[in-house]
């Protein structure tokens, strides 16, 4: 236990210290946290095998999944708070159209490019693997986007639309992946399961929305018994932890697999809570401050999880570069087309696609499932390589886009320090 505590302390301190360096070159703090994770990971300092000095193995990093899952739950809960009725009335239909269309277009673009590659070079990648990677390409990382928005206090039409689209993207990506993976499995093994392709994905989304709605309503009801700000914040934190735990439950009934999407459940909890609790905005500010160390740990651990061994496989790098280029084109063109269809302004049309490039946790989870395909190892390694690239440059591109449209205010030289004043009598 002492080794893990020292590792977590090193992760927090290392991430914060490196953020001072990245600030000098105007890079987002999230980039510093990811790089800190790489440095402390099993391929750098961790390789020295000194207990407490970094993470000594990928298994040790995986044992901290409870930290990353909890942080992801709070991040999703925070994003859910963006779905306030006032915003939904203003851009709800546009956000839904853009969220669905950009994800579908990205999947189609990547599918076409990788299937052509599979037909030209069948020994490099199979069609089932290509179809699966196309669906994984639709996923966008909400965590990196939220951290950039929070760090720079970004606000404006693009920021508000981005937060809604990122949230919708998760549900769409989950459905696209389930259908694509079912088709890929059928092509690989010669049999198709309607249950796995259609029924179970829809059940997962519906169950997640129902559980999230129930937890949001229950949280608001329990909040009413407390009047102290600290106690109300504590009960809110407890409910998010409870929601993360419940969303991890899986079970099978009469051959049908039932499960939940952690992101969807926590997003829905936040959405319901923010729309029925009159003091939700004040509570969210307090929770944001409380979970900041947890968010830093999430990114440092995510950086340590990145397997640098994938860089030693030329095929992975080649397919990975093609995947990154195709996905980037898909996200940018998909967002631009859907923005034009919904009559968005030119600044939003030109920049939304760039802010949707970060990819991490959700895609890695999909890649683990894809690893069960005959050449699933390639899919997993390609996603690992893409995540490594996207997470290092994605936050910077998001910051630049928000800066270009004037939704990030110049940072001032403010300080939280308070000097003691001399006591006068």
Image: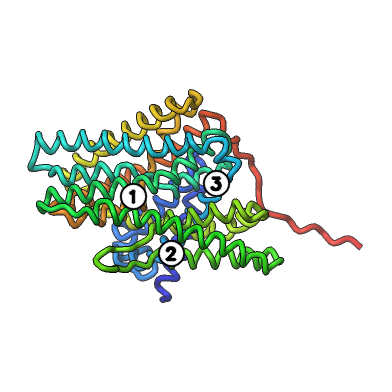
The front one of 140 and 275 is 275
- The residue at which mark 2 appears reads as 67
3D distance between C-alphas at marks 1 and 2? 23 Å
Mark found first going from the N terminus, 1 or 3 = 3
For the rendered model, the colour scheme is rainbow
Q: Circle 3 — which element?
A: loop
Of the numbered discs in the image, which one, if any, rests on residue 82?
A: 3
Residue at x-position 58% and y-position 63% = 219
Task: Kindly check if marks 1 and 3 are in contact, taking CB atoms under 8 A apart as contact.
Answer: no
Residue at x-position 33% and y-position 64% = 62
| Comparing labels 1 and 2, the label whose residue is closer to the camera | 1
| Residue furthest out toward the top | 346
Tell me where residue 405 appears, x and y as whole percent.
Answer: 53, 29
Q: Is residue 139 visible to us here?
A: yes
| Residue furthest out toward the left | 123
**Crowding at mark 2 (Cα within 10 Å: few <14, some 14-19, many 20+):** some
Count the marks: how many? 3
**Crowding at mark 1 (Cα within 10 Å: few <14, some 14-19, many 20+):** many
| Comparing labels 2 and 3, the label whose residue is closer to the camera | 3
Of the numbered discs in the image, which one, if any, rests on residue 311?
A: none
Query: Is 79 rendered above or below residue 352?
Result: below
Mark found first going from the N terminus, 1 or 2 = 2
- The residue at which mark 1 appears reads as 174
Q: Circle 1 — which element?
A: helix
Residue at x-position 29% and y-position 54% = 199
3D distance between C-alphas at marks 1 and 3? 20 Å
| Residue furthest out toward the right | 425
């Amino acid at each position: 236990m002492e080794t893990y505590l020292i590792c977590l302390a090193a992760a927090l301190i290392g991430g914060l210290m490196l953020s001072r360096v990245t600030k000098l070159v105007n890079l987002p703090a999230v980039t510093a946290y990811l790089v800190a994770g790489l440095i402390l990971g099993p391929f750098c300092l961790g390789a020295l095998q000194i207990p407490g000095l970094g993470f000594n193995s990928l298994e040790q990093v995986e044992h901290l999944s409870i930290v990353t899952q909890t942080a992801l739950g709070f991040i999703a809960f925070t994003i859910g708070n963006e779905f306030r009725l006032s915003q939904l009335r203003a851009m709800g239909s546009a956000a839904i159209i853009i969220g669905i269309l950009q994800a579908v277009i990205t999947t189609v673009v990547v599918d076409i490019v990788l299937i052509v590659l599979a037909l030209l070079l069948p020994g490099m990648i199979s069609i089932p693997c290509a179809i699966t990677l196309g669906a994984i390409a639709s996923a966008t990382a909400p965590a990196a986007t939220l951290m950039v928005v929070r760090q720079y206090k970004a606000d404006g039409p693009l920021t508000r639309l981005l937060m809604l689209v990122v949230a919708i993207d998760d549900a769409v990506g989950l459905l696209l992946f389930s259908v694509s993976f079912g088709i890929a499995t059928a092509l690989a093994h010669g049999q198709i399961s309607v249950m796995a392709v259609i029924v179970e994905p829809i059940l997962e989304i519906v169950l997640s929305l129902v559980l999230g709605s129930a937890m949001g309503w229950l949280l608001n009801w329990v909040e009413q018994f407390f009047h102290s700000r600290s106690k109300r914040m504590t009960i809110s934190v407890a409910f998010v932890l409870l929601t993360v735990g419940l969303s991890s439950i899986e079970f099978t009934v009469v051959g049908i697999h039932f499960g939940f999407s952690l992101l969807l459940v926590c997003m829905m909890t936040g959405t319901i809570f923010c729309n029925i609790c009159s003091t939700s905005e004040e509570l969210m500010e307090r929770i944001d401050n409380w979970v900041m160390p947890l968010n830093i740990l999430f990114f440092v651990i995510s950086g340590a999880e990145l397997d640098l061994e994938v860089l030693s496989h030329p095929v992975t790098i080649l397919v990975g570069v093609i995947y990154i280029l195709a996905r980037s084109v898909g996200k940018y063109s998909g967002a631009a087309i859907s923005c034009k269809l919904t009559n968005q302004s030119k600044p939003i049309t030109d920049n939304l696609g760039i802010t949707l490039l970060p990819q991490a946790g959700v895609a890695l989870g999909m890649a683990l499932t894809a690893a069960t395909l005959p050449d699933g190892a390639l899919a997993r390694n390609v996603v690992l390589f893409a995540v490594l690239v996207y997470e290092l440059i994605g936050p910077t591109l998001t910051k630049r886009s928000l800066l270009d449209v004037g939704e990030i205010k110049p940072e001032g030289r403010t300080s939280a320090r308070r000097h003691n004043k001399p006591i006068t009598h």
